Structure formats: structure tokens, C-alpha cells
Amino acid sequence: MATKQKVQLAIMNAVHDLPVLVARDEGFFLDEGLDIEFVTTPGMAQVTSSHEAHWDAIFERPLDTEYNEGGIDQYRMCEWGIVKRAVECTAQGLRPRRIVALGAAMSSFAIVVRADSVVYEPEQLKNRAIAVTPFNGSNFTTLKMLEGFLAQEYVKTTEAGNMPKRLEALRKGEVEAVSLMEPWISYAQKEGLRIVIESHSTRAEAAGDELDGPTLAAMFRAQAAAVELLEKDPTPYVHHLVAETGGLLEEKDFQTWRLLNAPPQPYTRERWDDTYNWTRKWDMVIEGATFETIVDNRAWE
């Protein structure tokens, strides 16, 4: 049984938060005795999102701002993005957060080019601009996908706004490629764009120190129950993703086979070492962090 009376739980891009949305819709949080306030913040997958994500201001983005001001207790994001925020928040004098789980949603990302592009394989993206969301999943996963094909100095990332804006930049020839997540990969396929490479990207779960272990455990059990439903048949919940396109994509055009989810798990020391050292290799996080100071698996204690 949860011990915190009210939990403020963040919802952003549906592909990252689908187990949370399903757990909410199906009453799994209530089944665990949880009183949840769902806090919706704009994300880069939403056609209505107007906020800009810049390289030098990650803590000024809507979700980060809401968390820092105390309006959110718990949220999830791409694994490397959570690592960066958990490591650097203290150095910037911001509200602390810990990694409390390896998250449920393993979202697909894809690097996409125009149908008439000369790029057919990852090697041909050498020194070509790829639009990403800085220090978020599309950024990190783009680097992960390309480092097996190109040396670091030849991978060129840039920013061009949310998913619809970066697709517009692609069509205008302002960038050679874009990094997309669902539902925008399905939309790109519908529009006849070319997928060069794609991969899954795991979420990490972050929480403030005020949120106790039993409450987190109950939240993760609710997500695990949602994952069971999604693994059996995700189609009843596709509307959450399609809605983010504002009518540009229909449910029949969404590629459900890309959805991949698993129950939240403890965040291991080995996982921390691999992820933090990789992020340091790309000079995307400050040095000096340790497993003991950043990770807290209190939901499993």
C-alpha cells in the first residue's frame, strides 16, 4: 500500500508514457491504492507543442521547470537524458532527483531522409546535418545508432524544433536527415520518406527524495500490469499516440509492431557504469558522478 497521500506524476510524449497512460485508463493505479495527479507537459512529439529545446537550457524545458518548482514528483525520459539531469541538477543548485528504475517504455527512434535523398545507408550521413531534440532521446539514440558507422567527429546533429517542424525542415532541404519517434515514424512512412536506421531507446525513471519506496513500488506494479495488456494487444491504446499528430495520421496507419514495453526494473550498477561512461565519452555530461549518489532502487528494498 502506498504511503504518500498524493503523487504528482508527469505525462509527456505518449510513446514514452504509454504504460502510465494505460495504467491510468484501466484503473491500475487506483488498484494499488494510489492517489495520482497526472501532470501533462508539452513534448516534442506533439503537433501542438510550441516550446523550443536548446542545447544550453535543458532545465528550462517545461517538464524540467515543473519538476524543479515542485509540481512533479516522478517522471521518465530517455535513459541518458535522465542521467544527465540527475547528475547535473545539484551542480546547478536545482531540486535533486534520483534514478529509481529502468523504465517500462522502450521507444523506437529512426533517422529519416527524403525519398529523393542521396543517403541510403548510415555511412552516407557523414558530416550531414541531422535534426534532433538536444539532450533527449532522439539526440542520444542518434549517436548510439551512428557510432557503429561513423567516427564521432563526422556525426553532425542540429536542432529544428518539434517533430512536425523538423519534418518541414527536411522537406525544405534545411537538414539532410531527422531523428523521429512514434507516431512520427509511422507518419514518415505514410508520406513516403526513407528510413535509414532505427533502434529502441529505453526510459529511465526519476523521482524526488520525497517519494518513498513503497509508493514507487506500487506505481511500478501498476505500470507492469499495463505492460501485460500492451504486450497482448496495443491497438486499443494507439489513439494516445495518433492524437499527437493532430489528424495527420490515422490509427490504421500506425505501426504497432514498433511498440515495445517491459515492467520497470531496478537500475543496476553495471547499467549505470555503461551508460554514464558512454555519455562521458560523448562529452554530454559532467564528470565525477557515482552510482551511490545518483541511483536509488528503494522501490525494491
Image: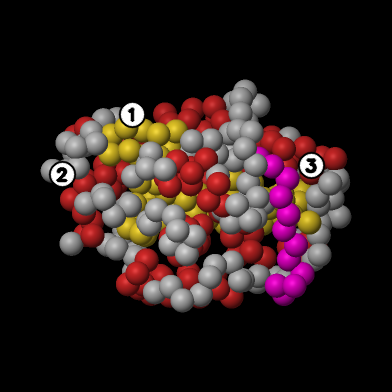
Residue that badge 2 annotates: 3
Residue that badge 1 annotates: 25
Q: Residue at x 51, y 57 (%)?
A: 81
Residue that badge 3 annotates: 169
- Under circle 2, the secondary element is loop
Bin the neighbour count of mark 1 within 10 Å (Cα to Cα): few under 14, some 14-19, many 20 and up.
few
Q: Marks 2/3: CA distance?
A: 48 Å
Disc sitting over residue 257 in the figure: none
**Where residue 44 sits in the image (x, y, percent)?**
59, 40
Q: Residue at x 21, y 47 (%)?
A: 215
Q: Quadrant of the N terminus?
A: top left
As drawn, 137 above or below 61? below
Say which label, 3 or 1, has the lower sequence index: 1
- Eye-nearest disc, 3 or 1: 3
As drawn, 278 above or below 14? below
Amino acid at the residue labelled 3: Ala
